Structures are given as C-alpha cells and as structure tokens.
Image (spheres, rainbow, N blue to C red):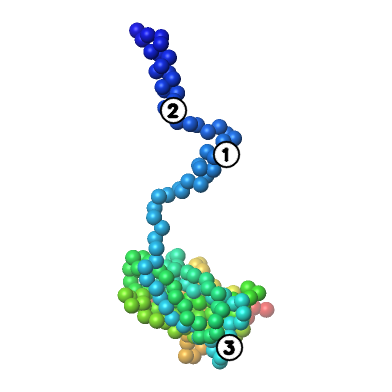
Amino acid sequence: MVHPIRLICLLLAGCASAPHAPAPNDTAGSAAAVSAPASDAPRRVPDAVLHGQLVWPDGEQPGVGSRARLTLAHRFAEQLPLAEIEVALDGAAPFAFQVPFVRDDVADSTVYRLDVSVYAEDGRLRWVSDGEHPVNLDRAADPSRVVLMAIEQFGVRHSQWDCGDDQATLRGPDPEPVLSVRGADHHLRRAHAAVGVRYVGAAAELWIRGDRARLQIADARQDCLRLPDEG
C-alpha cells in the first residue's frame, strides 16, 4: 500500500511534468500550430542558369513599366514548367536575361523550349517569342537569342478543316489557339514558318498555307482542305 504522503508527492510530480495544453483562447499556442510547416522537405535551390538576350524587331522598345515572363517548358509533353520567372524591363533593348533552374530536374537537355511573353505597363500582351524556340540546357547552358514578334500581327482565328478521315477545328486568339480533333483539344502556339502559318503543341501540329494545311497528330500526318465558313 502506498503511503498517503508519498501518493500526494507522486501526483504533484506528474502534474509538473505534463505538457501544457493551450486553451481555445491561447493565442500563442494557436499561432504556433498554424505557422508550423506541413512538410520538412528542403526547398530545392536552382544551381544552373540559362542566359541570353531578348531582341525587339525593327528597333522597337518595350516601353517604361513593361514586364517579361520567361518560361522553360517541355517541347513534347504538357507538364509543369521547368522554370518560370517574371522580370521588369528597365533597360533598353536588347535585354539580357537569366533563367535559373535545377539541373537535377533535367533528364534530357535537348527537349526544352523558351517561351517569352512581354506585357505593357497596362497589362496588355504586346510581344511573344517564337513558340518553337528550342534551348540546350547542357552544362554550359548555351546562350539563347530570342527575337520577339509583335502581338498586333495576330488576331482571332476560327477555321474548320477536312483532313480525310478527321475534321479539325482551330479556334481562339493567336498566338495560342486551340485545335480540336478526334474529340481532343490540343493547346497550340505560334511557331516559325518560312511559308504560311504554323502552330505546334505537345502532340499536334497544324501548318496552314492558304486553303490547305498539314495536320500532324503524334507521328501521323494528314493533308487538309479548309471548309467554307459557316453562315
């Protein structure tokens, strides 16, 4: 049998060693609980840089207050960007840039492209890069020279195409319309073409030359004829 005095001492010792449980109005305890990080995973720090220049056509300038968004994206798969930054264009063109990225995230240094969008001070999109501007992310991260295209030369596109066994519809504003074919939507972007207008995406391409076009889905190519506009 435990002596009463010894029992009281044991109870007091247990109370002294018990952790403090904050009351509902214990603001210090609540703040600590809310601010605790959900994960202890360390933040990955970029250890490589892609650098280059943005060049405007015909001596144009971006204007005071303009900003550029630079995105390193996969050329052949729709996935999260490898890196993306936004910078103020305070200096005169050409503008030197640096895009940091994590080298361990690069499985193949030859499958990425650099997308550039330049916005005016009022937020309007004014210039874009060639949508198929490949970059090499090898150890040296070769410099990249990006010649921008004025967005004023683009417009809203809507056209339908007879591609033999398939019918394709191109809709939406340049330079990033949507191509619908075989029940699937493909997000395209304007790409360089010596002749005509060419759009490319992760798994689709449409190259328009007048009333004719070439459609490519994966590795299959089809010739297309433009259908008359409805109405």
The label number, if any, that marks residue 16 in the structure image = none
Q: Earlier in the sequence, mark 3 or mark 1?
A: 1
Q: Amino acid at mark 2?
A: Ala
Q: Residue at x 56, y 79 (%)?
A: 90
Distance from disc 3 to disc 2, alpha carbons, whole Å, reads 71 Å
Task: Measure how far apart labels 3 and 1 are at the Cα level.
Answer: 56 Å
**Residue 149, picture quadrant:** bottom right
Q: Amino acid at mark 3?
A: Glu
Query: What label does residue 27 carry, if any?
Result: 1
Sequence-first tag of 3 and 2:
2
Residue 133's spot in the image, x, y percent? 44, 80
Q: Position of residue 103 (x, y in %)?
A: 35, 68
Q: Which residue position holds label 2?
A: 18
- Would you name the residue on which mark 3 appears? 60
Left or right of residue 79: residue 123? right
As helix, strand or loop, the secondary structure at mark 2 comes to loop
Of the image marks 2 and 1, the number of the one nearer the N terminus: 2
Q: Is residue 162 visible?
A: no
What is the x, y in percent for residue 78? 44, 68
Q: Relative to the observer, which residue lies in front, 134 or 83?
A: 83
